[in-house]
């Protein structure tokens, strides 16, 4: 299990649909994630473009990422699949927080409910430097649809509000989220509680967890991003918390390393 600071982490390489099998039922306090949106347009052709063409506004190119080319119905079905597995992994009352854009918002909230979660509301991420649009509102928001695993007691600190801030400028992933925003969200898990991100990308949720003293379990299917995230979280770990590299099963009986790769974050 984790040390007394609550800082411990594990990042598995593989498809979340497979890796969820190894998460003990009822072991997760918060599912905080940013799945591939399969968005960036309305038509099948739009959506199957490379993720760089769809999302990358940054100067330096970053490798494409996986799983972003489903059509609307396929995406909603796939979302419901992993959301059901995430519910099984979560303790009663746990929170689910899922990023999505305006195009996918209706499908996302349908899928959350199809997966068995109780949809509770929406929060937003407001990007101040979003591109102005002539004769129409600035499309400056992404959303966080949130839900609970059944009833959740009304207790604990005040939760996150709309976050105002841009995506990191020097980012490693095309759709990287700001750690400052994620730090507010991961506080919904109790100190030392377990946060799961099944679409870890560059590891921003993991960084937020270590900075906030929450344990982190991440999945990432793309080997490049798994390596990027492992190095990133490992770097935070060395600065702010004890190394966990000698703890191959740090989430105890509830979670085991079920990936095709040995659990060896870079030292
Ligand atoms: C939108 S990005 C997440 C970016 C992340 N929030 C960040 O700040 O860097 C989604 C990630 O999920 C990964 N992914 C896609 N399908 C997956 C699957 N079935 N299982 C695990 N990871 C998957 C992609 O490779 C991609 O890196």
Image (tube, rainbow, N blue to C red):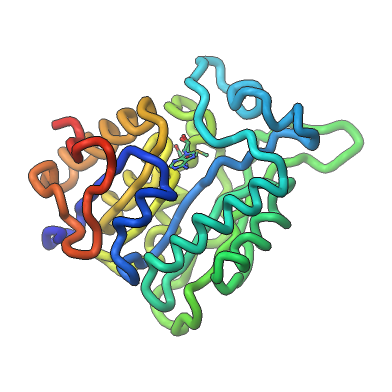
Say left or right for 171 vs 41. Answer: left
Q: Relative to 107, is 36 above or below?
A: above
Q: Relative to 212, is 223 above or below?
A: above
Say left or right for 169 vs 79. Answer: left
Q: Relative to 250, is 177 above or below?
A: above
Say if residue 56 shows up in the picture. no
Residue lying furthest left: 246
Q: Which residue is depicted at the point 14% across and 61% down?
A: 1
Q: Residue 253 location in percent, x, y?
A: 18, 64
**Which quadrant of the figure has residue 220?**
top left
Identify which residue, 267 or 84, lies in the foreground.
84
**Which quadrant of the figure has residue 57?**
top right
Q: Relative to 48, is 27 above or below?
A: below
Identify which residue, 134 or 111, lies in the foreground.
111
Q: Which residue is depicted at the point 55% across and 71% down?
A: 116
Identify which residue, 37 or 158, lies in the foreground.
37
């Amino acid at each position: 299990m984790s040390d007394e600071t609550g800082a411990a982490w594990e990042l598995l390489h593989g498809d979340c649909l497979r890796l969820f099998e190894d998460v003990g039922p009822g072991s997760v306090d918060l599912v905080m994630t940013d799945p591939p949106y399969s968005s960036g347009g309305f038509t099948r052709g739009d959506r199957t473009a490379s993720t760089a063409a769809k999302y990358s506004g940054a100067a330096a190119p970053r490798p494409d990422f996986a799983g972003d080319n489903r059509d609307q119905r396929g995406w909603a079905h796939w979302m419901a699949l992993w959301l059901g597995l995430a519910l099984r992994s979560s303790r009663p009352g746990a929170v689910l927080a899922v990023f999505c854009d305006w195009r996918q918002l209706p499908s996302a909230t349908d899928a959350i409910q199809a997966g068995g979660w109780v949809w509770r509301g929406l929060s937003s991420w407001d990007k101040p430097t979003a591109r102005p649009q002539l004769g129409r509102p600035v499309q400056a928001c992404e959303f966080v649809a949130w839900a609970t695993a059944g009833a959740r007691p009304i207790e604990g600190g005040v939760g996150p509000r709309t976050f105002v801030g841009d995506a990191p400028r020097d980012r490693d992933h095309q759709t990287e989220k700001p750690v400052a925003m994620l730090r507010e969200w991961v506080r919904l898990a109790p100190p030392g509680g377990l946060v799961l991100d099944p679409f870890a990308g560059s590891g921003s949720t993991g960084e937020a967890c270590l900075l906030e003293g929450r344990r982190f379990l991440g999945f990432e299917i793309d080997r490049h991003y798994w390596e990027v995230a492992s190095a990133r979280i490992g770097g935070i770990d060395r600065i702010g918390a004890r190394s966990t590299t000698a703890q191959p099963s740090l989430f105890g009986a509830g979670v085991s390393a079920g990936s095709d790769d040995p659990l060896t974050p870079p030292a």
